[in-house]
Image (cartoon, rainbow, N blue to C red):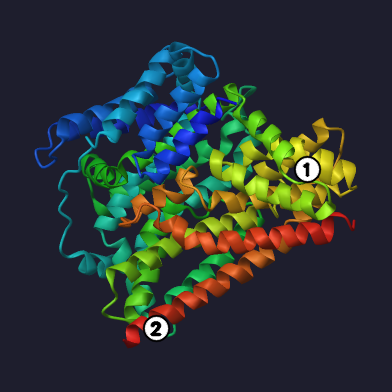
Amino acid sequence: MIGLDVLYVLAGLLFAIYAVATLTDATNPKRFTSAAFWGLFATSFLAGSYLPDVVNGLILVGMALLAGFNLLGRGEHPQPVDKPVRAARWGNRLFIPALIPPVVTLLGTLTLKGVTVGGQPLVDPKQVTLISLGAGIVLATLVALVMFRASPAGATREGRRLMESVGWAGLLPQALAALGAVFAAGHVGDVIGDLATTWLPLGTPLAAVCAYTLGMALFTAIMGNAFAAFPVMTAAIGLPIVVGRFGGDPAIMGAIGMLSGFCGTLTTPMAANFNIVPAALLDLTDRYGVIKAQLPTALLLLLANTVLMYALVYRF
Amino acid sequence: MWVLLGVGVVVAGFAARLNPLLIVAAAAIVTGIAAGLDLVATLAILGKAFRDNRYISVVWLILPLIGLLEREGLQERAKALIGRLKSATAGRLLLIYMVIRQGTAAIGLTSLGGHAQMVRPLIAPMAEAAAEAGDPDLTPASRDRVKAFAAATDNIGLFFGEDIFIAIASILLIKGFLEENGIVVEPLHLSMWAIPTAVLALVIHGTRLLLLDRRLAREAGR
């Protein structure tokens, strides 16, 4: 059965190549500490499953210290000057490798779930989408290598160029997920839920709706994830007050409550893969540039969700 | 109550613009200690979750491909396509992308998009090219704003489209949570109530995209 392990080995090997190449890259002013960062990432992918939990924790802390003390550098990666000429030569054929990963992900997700080989499922049924994405990336990279007559070393050099420009932001979403687990172990959510029910005014149907939608957005902004906020806020306010005391409709409460949380996601650096990673990928000067672009939409939509819920939840 | 110190570390850290990875590590250790765990136990919880969530970082496998394509001029090609459309503006282009992103997410195709796969190689350069066509002297600040809007549009289209699909994780989470509390709802019923917000998201963000065009045009006239 093909599981996530295959992807972890691939990613581990790729980061190991980045680490070695960085170590020998004289154009990177911080090449030793940068190589250590990518080397730790590679170790986590290749050996993480076999290392004790504490060691995995130390790997994360080590990477955080390297990034936190600004020890991550970038090498120089000169790009060809004739890119417009190359673009004109390839024309729209250039889009073919770019579209292979999404198309393969889609087809794989739709077809691979039921496929069995010798009574065993071919791919881990719980991970079909990610494994299809991995397969699509591998296939597209092979197509690109043949099409451009590039060498695998050329491909990893290009990959390293982009990975260096993403930098520490590339680890942040995974690190935040780990922080979420520590928050859960410390029952941070329950404490905030208790605080919300104690301090928020919940005496009228309108106040209950406002407390619930705003609470979802705020708590999501703190946790970086609406999925973490939903059970806490819904158990604290949504179910007992909006539905229980004032007789609201649970489906409308749940659906619009979750979407209020998504408004919070748009406002917070804690949702790094949506808000911080693209700022790094797009070379924005302001790390919070994407959040600033989203903020007015998020606030207006939160208001709209509150009005919608109040107008609908007690009516059906 | 002391466990909220960890949340305090997060808020203060981001406000002070410290490195986010450092904030995460510090907040985790503070939360663990405040919850009465020792340092080793805290690191173990952090490390286990870090290992279990490696799948999140697997997306970086795509970078060699994107790099190869960029080397052969993918961004230039995307710009050239837009340059030919005289009526293309950054805002209109992103509005079209928003409709496509929201529409495909609504039928479950959430993987058709994303920042590494779509926005950096295609959507952002196209929006940039459209903005440049309207204003050859585009300021760096405006260029950054257009790129930030490209990323924002991808997020907003995804978030407020996906909940219309009945088998998406968030709908299943709502259904599961309500079921645990003795309330049975149909996924279709949940996704139906995501439609009003989806429409409003398109109206609100779409309006802002067209306002972005007006702002760019005003700057071009100066």
- A211 vs B119, left or right, is right
Percent across and percent down for residue B82 are 38, 75
Percent across and percent down for residue B180 are 81, 31
Which disc is residue B217 wearing? Answer: 2
- Category of crowding for the residue at label 2, using alpha-carbon neighbours closer than 10 angstroms: few (below 14), some (14–19), many (at least 20): some
Percent across and percent down for residue B150 are 44, 63
Residue B71: quarter of image: bottom left
Q: How far separated are the C-alphas under marks 2 and 1?
A: 45 Å
Residue drawn 72% across and 47% down?
A212
Q: Quadrant of the C terminus of chain A?
A: bottom right
Q: Which residue is mark 1?
A: A238
- Category of crowding for the residue at label 1, using alpha-carbon neighbours closer than 10 angstroms: few (below 14), some (14–19), many (at least 20): many
Amino acid identity at mark 2: Ala
Q: Is residue A217 above or below residue A123?
A: below
Judge whether residue A291 can be spotted in this image: yes
Residue drawn 38% across and 76% down?
B130
Q: Is residue A29 above or below residue A41?
A: below
- Which residue appears farthest toward the bottom when viewing the image? B221
Amino acid identity at mark 1: Gly
- A45 vs A104, left or right, is left
